[in-house]
Every structure is written in C-alpha cells, then in structure tokens.
Amino acid sequence: MVTTELCYSRVIAGALVFSKSAPDLLWAVARCLERLGALPETLVWDREAAIHAGGGRPTDEFAAFCGRFGLGWIILGAGDAQAKGALERSHRFMRTNFLPGRVFAGHLDFQAQLDAWCDRVNGRVHRTTRAVPAERLVLERKHMRALPAVLPDLDRRVVVRVAQQPYVRVDRNDYSIDPRLAGRRVEVRVSQRHIIAIALDTGEMGARHRRVFAGGLTITDPAHQRELERLRGLRRHQPQVEIRPLARYDQLIPA
C-alpha cells in the first residue's frame, strides 16, 4: 500500500497495490494526489528500488512521472527514516486503527474502506497540530498547483508476438488471447483493473481480462477456449496426405 501525507495540513491518502514495480507504485501516487486534490512542489521518497536508481538519482520511470506533473523530488539518504517521521507515525496509526477487526470482500472493497477511513481521520483534530487536517487543507491548497485536467496515462504497455499456445504472461499469471491472433504481434495494456490485448496490424481486440493479483494462475476466456477447440478440430479433419510405398519408386527408377 502507498500512502501520502501533506506536511502542513497532515491530510493523508492511501492506495492499495500488489507489487513494488514502478507502474503500480506511480499509479498509486497519482491516485493519492487526486485524492488530495492538488499538487505539492516536491515528493519525498526513501530508497525504494522502483524510485531510486542509485547514488541519490531517480529511476527513469520516476523522473518521467515527476516531469509529467511538474514535481520536484527528494530521495532520502540510506537509513534516514526520521526525515519522513510524520508519515511513519501515520503508518503506525493506520496499522493499529484501520486494519484490525476489518473484513474485506476484495481489493476494491479494501480501497473503498480505506478512502472512507481517511476521510474520517482527515476530519478529526490532529494530535500534533491540534487542528482539523481537512480545514487546514483549504488553506494549503491556495499555495499548491491544481491537478491537470486529465491525469497522465500510467498503464503499462508491452508488445509481444502471440505464441501458438495463445497466452501472455503478466506478472505471475497467464492470460488467454484469441487463438486466431497466433503468430501476430499485439500490444498488451496492463491497468489496475484490466489486461487488454490489441492486434497491431488490424486494431482488433485480442483479449480483455480482469486483472488478477493472486499469482501462479492461468486465466482463460471461455470464448478463446471454444475458438481454440474449433481450430484444433479443423486441423484434425484435414485430408491425410497419401504415403506412397517405397517399392513404387524402385519400379520407376531402375537401379
């Protein structure tokens, strides 16, 4: 889970993700910024592998993300967790106040409950500032930039050639693709909700699956399975090529 907190108002927001890859982490940051309703000047991060490329330098993905929003960044030194102590205290509060005793129907329900919990917490008096974060946010937003009208597209994209066994691997799961696209190139688009495959040559839809965050699974669209069985049936019923006895060639070609 990725959480954010504004320094002045102490408003918090969180987003649930299931990996530490750059596309998922940056999507979560964008969602938190959308919940905050404005853009800060600077993002402060510790040395997360998807953010920190080494030597205090950002990864290309993180630098591109900040460039799209016009954000600065500070990557903390190794072991300098105290530099973001306010957020660490909020993490402890979340673990002890939000998570215990709750039941979640799924990841969407988790996110909905987390958003509602953050709204309640932001509307209460903060123990340190002795003020209501949501009220201080009104003043803080006057010194922040507005969000862009359209948020950047942060979906992961990859181009692959569909194998004869028509599946594509995303993270640790295999998702079926229309077997009629075997041998052709498709663009696979990975969002937080769906896995979509589009044929590059014709633009036709090759697959649309709900993204599954559990690992080691094979997800097959029933329509893809039926089409695969149909194509296999056609191959089985193709006419057989006659195999001539070698003796016929001996009769035609004298020794």
Image (spheres, rainbow, N blue to C red):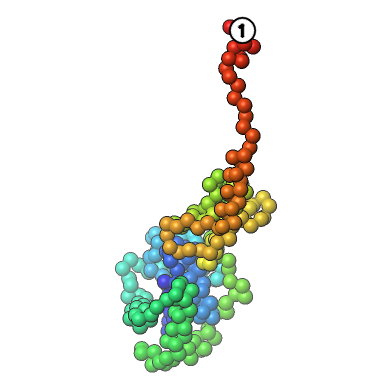
Residues 250 and 52: in front is 250
What residue do we see at 34% from left, 78% from top? 95
Residues 141 and 88: in front is 88
User: What percent of the width, then of the height, locates residue 99?
Assistant: 37, 79
Residue 92 in the figure: left or right of residue 16: left
The vertical placement of 250 against 25, above or below, is above
Residue 92 in the figure: left or right of residue 177: left
Instruction: Check disc 1 and report its element: helix, strand or loop.
Output: loop
User: What percent of the width, then of the height, locates residue 94?
Assistant: 37, 80
Specify the farthest residue to the right: 202
User: What percent of the width, then of the height, locates residue 155?
Assistant: 55, 63
Q: Quadrant of the C terminus?
A: top right
What residue do we see at 62% from left, 43% from top? 234
Is residue 68 among the parts visible in the rendering?
yes
| Count of marks, rendered view | 1
The vertical placement of 252 against 223, above or below, is above
The vertical placement of 139 against 39, above or below, is below
Q: Quadrant of the N terminus?
A: bottom left
What residue do we see at 62% from left, 26% from top? 242
Is residue 57 among the parts visible in the rendering?
no
The vertical placement of 148 against 241, above or below, is below
Residue that mark 1 sits on: 254
Specify the farthest residue to the left: 79
How would you rate the neighbour count of disc 1 (Cα within 10 Å): few for under 14, some for 14-19, many for 20 or more?
Answer: few
Residues 231 and 175: in front is 231
